[in-house]
């Protein structure tokens, strides 16, 4: 693969770095409570890669096992949440990298909302992406944007 397919990222302090090769298999917003807890965020955007597409360097990332077989990694120095990692089913082992840890997150464009019903109620969404009850590959989506759940109609 050419270097054009490589992307880099890392934690806030720079101790943990990573490089990805090739395309992400999926970039999604996740509204699930576990992702929100791990990141301290209202919504978390993740870019998925097969494990062999990701190489870490620098400090070894710390891993919190949030459920059996599921790791949520972070930097032991600055605490930046870095990944959801575990079994990706047909994809084998995967890393879901938190988008804001990429050096150029704008290159990765989300295509769906996962776990839409778990979102914080005041979090209204006005984009055109499909919203799924669970993982973004569940079919069909609950609804397609833009749909307002509470905003005054235009
Ligand atoms: Zn760090
Ligand atoms: Zn999630």
Image (cartoon, rainbow, N blue to C red):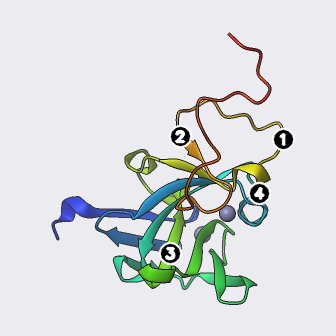
Q: Which quarter of the figure has residue 134?
A: bottom right
| Pointers 1 and 2 in contact (C-beta within 8 Å) | no
Residue 90 location (% of width, % of height)? 44, 81
**Residue that label 2 marks:** 129
Sequence-wise, which precedes: disc 3 or disc 4?
4
Q: Is residue 65 left or right of residue 126?
A: right
**Which is more foreground, mark 3 or mark 4?**
3
Give me the C-alpha separation between circle 1 and circle 4.
Answer: 16 Å
- Indicate whether 16 appears above or below 64: above
- Furthest residue toward right: 121
| Pointers 1 and 4 in contact (C-beta within 8 Å) | no
**Residue that label 1 marks:** 121
Which quadrant of the figure contains the C terminus?
A: top right
Which quadrant of the figure contains the N terminus?
A: bottom left
Sequence-wise, which precedes: disc 1 or disc 4?
4
Sequence-wise, which precedes: disc 2 or disc 4?
4
**Residue that label 3 marks:** 95
Q: Residues within 10 Å of mark 2 (few under 14, many from 20)?
A: some
Sequence-wise, which precedes: disc 1 or disc 2?
1
Sequence-wise, which precedes: disc 3 or disc 1?
3
Q: Residues within 10 Å of mark 1 (few under 14, many from 20)?
A: few
Residue 49 location (% of width, % of height)? 42, 71
**Which is more foreground, mark 1 or mark 4?**
1
Residue drawn at 72 percent across, 14 percent down: 153
Give me the C-alpha separation between circle 2 and circle 4.
Answer: 23 Å
**Residue that label 4 marks:** 40
């Amino acid at each position: 693969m050419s270097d054009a397919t490589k992307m880099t990222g890392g934690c806030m302090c720079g101790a943990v770095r990573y490089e990805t090769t090739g395309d992400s298999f999926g970039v999604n917003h996740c509204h699930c409570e576990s992702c929100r807890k791990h990141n301290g965020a209202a919504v978390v955007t993740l870019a998925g890669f097969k494990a062999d597409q990701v190489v870490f360097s620098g400090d070894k990332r710390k891993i919190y096992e949030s459920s059996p077989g599921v790791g949520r990694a972070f930097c032991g120095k600055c605490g930046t949440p870095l990944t959801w990692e575990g079994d990706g089913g047909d994809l084998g082992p995967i890393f879901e990298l938190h988008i804001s840890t990429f050096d150029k997150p704008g290159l990765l464009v989300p295509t769906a909302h996962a776990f839409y019903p778990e979102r914080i109620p005041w979090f209204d969404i006005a984009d055109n992406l499909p919203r799924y009850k669970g993982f973004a590959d569940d079919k069909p989506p609950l609804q397609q944007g833009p749909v307002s759940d509470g905003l005054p109609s235009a």
